[in-house]
Image: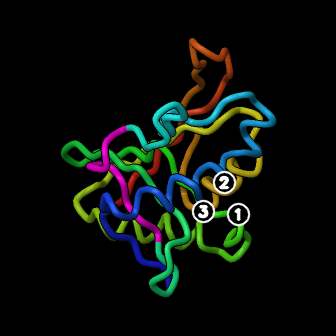
Amino acid sequence: MITVRKMTKGDAPALYDMALRAFTPDYEKYGFYPPVLNLKKKRFLPPLLFGNVILADDEMVGAAFVATIGKNGEIGSIFIDPAHQKKGYGYEAMLAIEKRYPKIKNWKLDVLRENYGLHHFYESLGYVKTGEMRDPKSGLAGFAYIKHLQ
């Protein structure tokens, strides 16, 4: 069973290593890691205030960085350790995040244009593509997605 809880300082080192493993394929393909990873200081950015641990039967398997304001939430980064991928944990984690933040009615996230597997994944969860954006530093294009809850 997947659960989600607030990240603590003690969780961060193991989750940082997990994030490096999870995002290495993107780094190899696109040449950069997501902004949530500060490679020089070997820690997460933004602060732990936004971090949530994803647990499968009480074992850490990933994390999600979530920002909320009023009824709006944004998933900045989410990952599952490669050792635990292809088990349905990502799907369950997304639903667990929605349950963890019951006041949030509008969820937003961004996906790289070329990551077609993630497009399908988020669309299967009810997210709808709402626009396109381009990262000014890397020049990579992506799509904005939103999901409205009742």
Q: Secondary structure at mark 1?
A: helix
**Given the image, on which type of amino acid does mark 1 rest?**
Pro
**Is mark 1 in CB contact (under 8 Å) with mark 2?**
yes
Query: Crowding at label 3, few (<14), some or many (≥20) Cα neighbours within 10 Å?
Result: many
What is the distance, in whole Å, between disc 1 and disc 2 at their CAs? 6 Å
Residue under label 1, please give it. 82
What is the distance, in whole Å, between disc 2 and disc 3 at their CAs? 6 Å
Q: In x, y percent, where is residue 36?
A: 47, 39
Among the two numbered marks 2 and 3 on one chain, the one whose residue lies closer to the N terminus: 2
**Given the image, on which type of amino acid does mark 3 rest?**
Ile
| Residue located 47% across and 76% down the image | 55
Q: In x, y percent, where is residue 51?
A: 36, 54
Query: Where is residue 6, by image quadrant?
Result: bottom left
Q: Secondary structure at mark 3?
A: strand
Nearer to me, 54 or 38: 38
Residue under label 2, please give it. 22
**Given the image, on which type of amino acid does mark 2 rest?**
Ala
- Give above or below for 63 relative to 45: below
**Is mark 1 in CB contact (under 8 Å) with mark 3?**
yes
What is the distance, in whole Å, between disc 1 and disc 3 at their CAs? 6 Å
Toward the right, the furthest residue is 29
Q: Which residues are magenta?
A: 46-54
Q: Secondary structure at mark 2?
A: helix
Nearer to me, 81 or 17: 17
**Left or right: 64 in relation to 120:** left
| Residue located 37% across and 60% down the image | 52
